Amino acid sequence: MNRILLILFLTFYLPCFSQTQSEMNKDANNEYQKADIELNNVYQKILIEYKSDSVFIDRLKKVQRIWISYRDAELEMKFPAKNKQAEYGSVYPMCVSNFLKKLTEQRT
């Protein structure tokens, strides 16, 4: 009897907590956006704190542009298919957001 109740519980109650792929894509993108905002906040603080050191600021800006190119190249390497949505399916946006979040947090 307990086993039947457990099966019924798992069958009807637990799906209430599931998410659609669209929701998971959106959540992952929101997490990436938070990481990107944090990186930009840190970047702006550094620009303000070191504004008197023009050589450092110029090099920081150069390195940041290079990092963005690196980030984009890493993303292309991770997901090399030409028609990405068709190749990787509906999970692709979530995977991209998770990967970008990881790279952005490392950069921060």
Image (cartoon, rainbow, N blue to C red):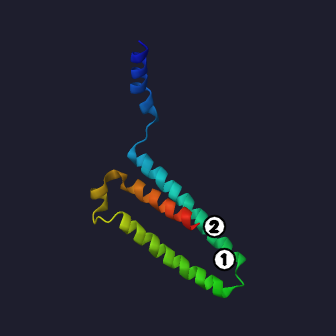
Mark 1 and mark 2: Cα distance apart in space: 10 Å
Q: Residue at x 42, y 32 (%)?
A: 15
User: Dividing the image into 4 quarters, which one contains the N terminus?
Assistant: top left
Q: For the point 47% across and 56% down, which residue is it?
A: 29
The residue depicted at 46 percent of the width and 35 percent of the height is 17
- Establish if 60 lies above or below 6: below
Q: Position of residue 12 (x, y in %)?
A: 40, 25
SS of the residue at dot 1?
A: helix
Q: Which mark is residue 47?
A: 1
- Judged left or right of residue 85, residue 13 is right
Left or right position of 80 against 39: left
Picture quadrant of residue 8: top left
Instruction: Measuring from the top left, give residue 53's x and y in whole percent.
Output: 69, 85
**Circle 2: residue type:** Asn
Determine which residue is flagged by label 2: 41
Residue type marked 1 = Leu
Count neighbours of disc 2 (C-alpha within 10 A) and say few if under 14, some if 14 to 19, many if 20 or more: few
Q: Determine the secondary structure under disc 2.
A: helix
